[in-house]
Amino acid sequence: MFVFWWSATLASRLLTDRFVFEGLAASARSVESVLEFDSPTPGIRLGNYRLDPAYERPASGHYFVVRTQDGTLSSRSAWEQHFQVPLLAAGEQRLMRGTGIAGEPMLFWYGGYSRQGQLFTIAVAKDISAMKNKLQVFQWFSASIALVLLLALLGVQRLIVKRSVDKLDTIRRDMKRLEHGKAVALSEDVPAEVLPLVREFNRMLRRYDQRLRQSRNAVGNLAHSLKGPLNLLLRETESIPAEQHDQAVIAQNAEAIRQLIESELKRARLAGRGTVGQRFDVDAELPALIGLLEQVYSDKSVDVRYNIGPGVELVHDRQDMLELIGNLLDNAVKWSRSVVIVNLRSARGILIDVEDDGPGCSPEELGRLTQRGVRLDESVAGHGLGLSIVKDIVDMYEGRLELVASTRLGGLRATVFLPARSRSAD
């Protein structure tokens, strides 16, 4: 606002000065047109032409002085003024500010002329006291406008800040509602500056909710799987048929329980301890995952080959990808004879192919593999619980899971497509 006021006052003063100087130049041309030179004796006088009557009134505020090498010729209005008029060369001009005899502000225009071999200078002056007073009024007016605009801008700014802070209070209230279980996400009706933070927070909330559902499903899977073998154990221990038969049944069901527990522990090892929201580094994580499975199945000699295509980047949660790829590899290595092939490539998203040379599955069994009720010991090919977990993660990312027979290796081929962006990833 200060710059606005300063610019307005400076522009008004410069425009006023220019207007006055142009008028003084025109007056100087009028004076020059009525000048007459005496000859043969040097001298200068005004002709019979009439000039502006203001030049005839003393102290009128309009003055002119003509200076030659021999003397000066002044308007009647300038008789009481004492102007210092330099002798200028023909064509030379000067513009000056100064004061009159009473200290009044004045503008001066000087111009050099030549006629009949004589050099002379015409000085034209004007009292600008009235204009200066009007300029001061304009300056005060512009200062008032600038002050009003400043107060208005401060008021609007205060209103905007207050409304923005009120929306931040909405975030605080939403967080209290989250704490008490009355909301599932923060409102996105917030200032644009904090909207990315709120969206990221909501994404993390969705991720925690998905984690909770996965954990509940895993606990349900484990409880459902353990229920049947334990019931059999209880019935066998209560009945008294052949003792050797009882021991075999108990051992068989205990082994089933052990395998199920090992499966859940293996899943936990595959998921690792990555923080929520951390991205999956394909080049670093996939070889480490394969090495872990080779240690788990150290009793088998399985050649796990992998190929990562150009531009492959899994912009998804690290734990989800560890579980997804880990379960696919775990099933493949577990049921393979000697070879497992993994391919990752980019195709408007990510395609993950895992093939093994195991016994494979019939078409009827392929349709049952991803069902939650199908367990490892219930599936002929053994691709039950792990693939149901894979299907949950794929559905969460709005992807696709396809299970078919591998034409290259003869076993099972699992193909997963994950879109580049999804609501879960966002």
Image (spheres, helix red, strand yellow):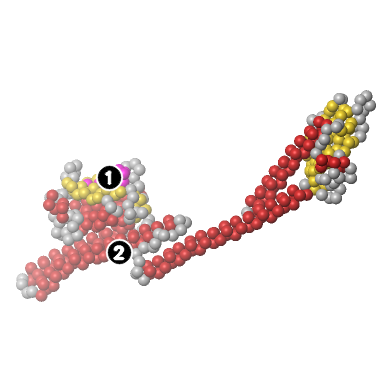
> Does residue 112 appear in the picture of this structure?
no
Query: At which x and y percent is residue 166?
Result: 47, 65
Residue at numbered disc 1? 343
- Tell me where residue 262 sits by quadrant: bottom left
Residue drawn at the location 89% of the way across and 43% of the way down: 79
Tell us which disc is closer to us: 1 or 2.
Answer: 2
Q: Is residue 312 magenta?
A: no
Nearer to us in this view, 147 or 403? 147
Give the numbered dot on residue 242: none
Main secondary structure of the magenta stretch: strand
Residue drawn at the location 19% of the way across and 49% of the way down: 403
Q: Which residues are magenta?
A: 346-355
Q: Secondary structure at mark 1?
A: strand
Residue at numbered disc 2? 212
Say which amino acid is labelled 2.
Leu
- Tell me where residue 210 sits by quadrant: bottom left
